[in-house]
Amino acid sequence: MNRYVPSDACVDAPESSAEPPLQVQFNNSLLDVYLFSLYLQARSPVMLVYLLGTSAFIGYTVWSQVDAQIRSFVLFLVPTVLCLVLLALAQMLILLAWILVHRDKTYWHSRTLELTDQAVIASTELTRFEVHWPAVHKVLRTSWCLYLQPSASSAHCVPRRAFPDREAFARFSALAVELKARTKLGSKGGKSVESSPSAQSMTAHTGGCHCGRVRFQVMAPARIEVTDCDCSICSRSGYLHLIVPKSRFKLLSGADALTTYEFNTKTAKHSFCSVCGIKAFYVPRSHPDGYSVNARCLDEGTVEHMAITRSDGKNWEKTYASGRAKPVE
């Protein structure tokens, strides 16, 4: 959240021959996230200079306005400390606002965080999201918490108290850092054959809009890979893209209820239900020869896993330098 904080914060994990725990159950805590944010800023020379400099300047300004006869170091120290406290409280309010705006409704629910060689899986009673390690934004650890940010709008602070003992926490956090580090040092090639859609059996997924007038069927694996785009329209609608070729998509009903919205290059055809307003699918600019299905509009029961990859839609032309993405299989 703060571009001035150091790129990582870590501690040495104790050596142990025991296998690290692969999952942990915990609750997100505003206090944990806030204290971790303060910790990172305390490690940043730039932020320390900024905070202390601002507070000292305000303290000196107040001190200089006092009559020379009653000036003392206390009159400088008190407003300086008060300014630091107010800045800390302001940061907590900003952090709370950020959580309320960007987090899902299950953010405060008890959740399970599971580590695998390929992905990190966060699940609650209502949701289950799988994010492959190359797409994970950040993994940072300290002696008292593990900060894991799967995407731009999702972050978790796993406290040490969620583990049975200190060593279990240290091994789990060390494993998370190691798995993330492997993706930086590993090959930059594409997906393995096992993860490609053509190598997996297809499942008939159905879905539709809120009112039920628009219904569709899409052929895709039971373990789907979707994209979380942060462009101006996707970020506002919370759209999760499941890209498929036209041959694997079938509109079952509601063609007469669809309305199309276009903007900018007008390549994308944003089709939405004219009754309830839900965009369940559309023709995307990145894949004009296919369809993007909103994974949030799929019916329950056929999706086993959902791996989410972030896409930089704010810089669309840079992300898709050729004017479109690689065709889907």
Image (cartoon, helix red, strand yellow):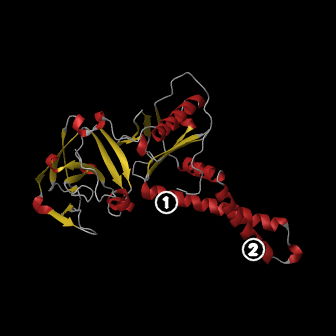
Compared to residue 270, the image places residue 176 above or below, namely above
Q: Which residue is mark 1?
A: 97
Please state which of the two labelled residues, at mark 2 or mark 1, is closer to the viewer. 2
Residue type highlighted by circle 2: Thr
Please tell me which residue lies in front, 276 or 43.
43
Q: Looking at the image, can residue 301 be seen?
A: no
- Report the residue at 69% width, 65% height from top: 83
Numbered mark located on residue 108 in the image: none
Is the Cβ of the residue at disc 2 closer than 8 Å to that at disc 1? Answer: no
Q: Is residue 10 left or right of residue 183?
A: right
Residue type highlighted by circle 1: Ala
Q: Residues within 10 Å of mark 2 (few under 14, many from 20)?
A: some
Specify the quadrant that holds the C terminus.
top left
Measure the C-alpha gap from mark 2 to mark 1.
31 Å
Secondary structure found at label 2: helix
Secondary structure found at label 1: helix
Q: Which residue is mark 2?
A: 61
Return the x and y of residue 181 as percentages of the image width and height.
50, 39
Compared to residue 43, the image places residue 187 above or below, namely above
Q: Is residue 234 left or right of residue 203?
A: right
Q: Residues within 10 Å of mark 1 (few under 14, many from 20)?
A: few
Return the x and y of residue 106 as percentages of the image width and height.
40, 48
